[in-house]
Image (spheres, grey):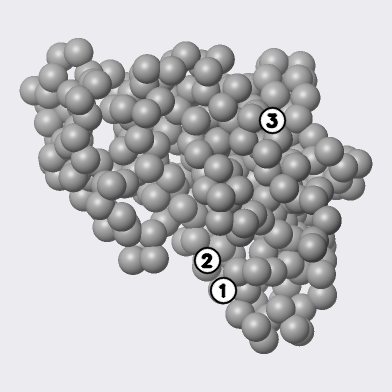
Amino acid sequence: MSDRLPYTPPYAPGHRSVEYRIPVPTSLDEYQKALHYMTGRTAKKEVETGDSGVELIVSEPFDDPARGGKGVYTEKVYHLESRMPAVARKLLPNSAKVVHEFCWNAFPNIRTELHVPFFKKASVIIESRHVEGLDVPDSVFADAEPCPSDTPVVVLNIASDPTPEKDACDEEEPSLVSSATTGRLPLARDWLDTAAAGTAAKDTPYITVCKRVMLTFSYTGVQKKGETSGLDSYKPIFLTTHKQLVSWIDDWFPMTLEDCRNFEIEILEQLEASKSKPES
């Protein structure tokens, strides 16, 4: 791994924020291992296609009550150049083509900070909380820094909300995929109403993934537009990744947490090895 990334605190408390809530048919323990599996599987695709845009810089244990307690701290660099239009690749400096991610994962509490070196007056903070059941208390983010009082709450339905066209795949739609291992899929479009009414399968667990995104983009003339488009961009990301996580349930469900962690580590090591190979 490379040297650590230069870290600076977020530019300012988020000027605008949105709280996304994504109910899923898993337990907390199941979701935790599914996260590791999903990270590994996504990285595996990048290894196979050679289109990797992620670089793992640091991965180490941490113990900090202010960051949620004990967990794993990671630093990553997301390289965006290959996914940019040709004009943007030509005009933008290198510091505008990467995103630095700092993450404190003390599951079920996770804090992620994102910085683009070129934009010194911009930053993103994502606070994640994972709550058992479908009823989320108002105090779910009581241990996090304050956010604007008018922060909207957006509930995402992984069965009925449409997947962005570029990511659409029948094998990654919980409403179309069956689960021979758990019997929890496919999900009906009204599965949330059924679960809330208590008429769903009694042995199916549920959790709600709560992600509060706080964004600062303090540039005169484009601040409002930048913050609005930035916040809106997370909806399709959260929706698609959770559809994938649930649709892959028969792959990760039989695995232990250690199995899923080892799978993730193995794939990330392959990813690093592929980056270090000299070009022929």
Instruction: Left or right? Give the position of 123 relative to 155.
Output: right
Asked whether residue 137 is in view, the answer is: no
Distance between mark 2 and mark 1 Cα atoms = 5 Å
* Along the line of sight, the residue nearer the viewer: 256 or 20: 256
Q: Which type of secondary structure does the marked residue at label 2 adopt?
A: helix
For residue 228, the mark is 2
Picture quadrant where residue 187 is located: top left
Kind of residue at disc 1: Lys
Identify the residue position indicated by label 1 in the image. 225
Judge the density around disc 3: few (<14), some (14-19), many (≥20) Cα neighbours within 10 Å: many
* Gap in angstroms between the C-alphas marked 1 and 3: 29 Å
Q: Secondary structure at mark 3?
A: strand
Question: Secondary structure under badge 1?
Answer: helix
Residue farthest to the left? 199
Residue at the spot 20% in from the left edge and 25% down from the top edge: 180
Find disc 3 in the rendering and name its residue.
Answer: 104
Residue 230, image x, y percentages: 56, 63
Residue 25 % position (x, y): 29, 27
Please name which of the two marks, 3 or 2, marks the residue nearer to the observer: 3
- The Cα–Cα distance between marks 3 and 2, rounded to whole angstroms, is 26 Å
Q: Is residue 185 above or below residue 233?
A: above
Amino acid type for the residue under numbered disc 2: Thr
State left or right for residue 196 relative to residue 121: left
Residue drawn at 31 percent across, 46 percent down: 172
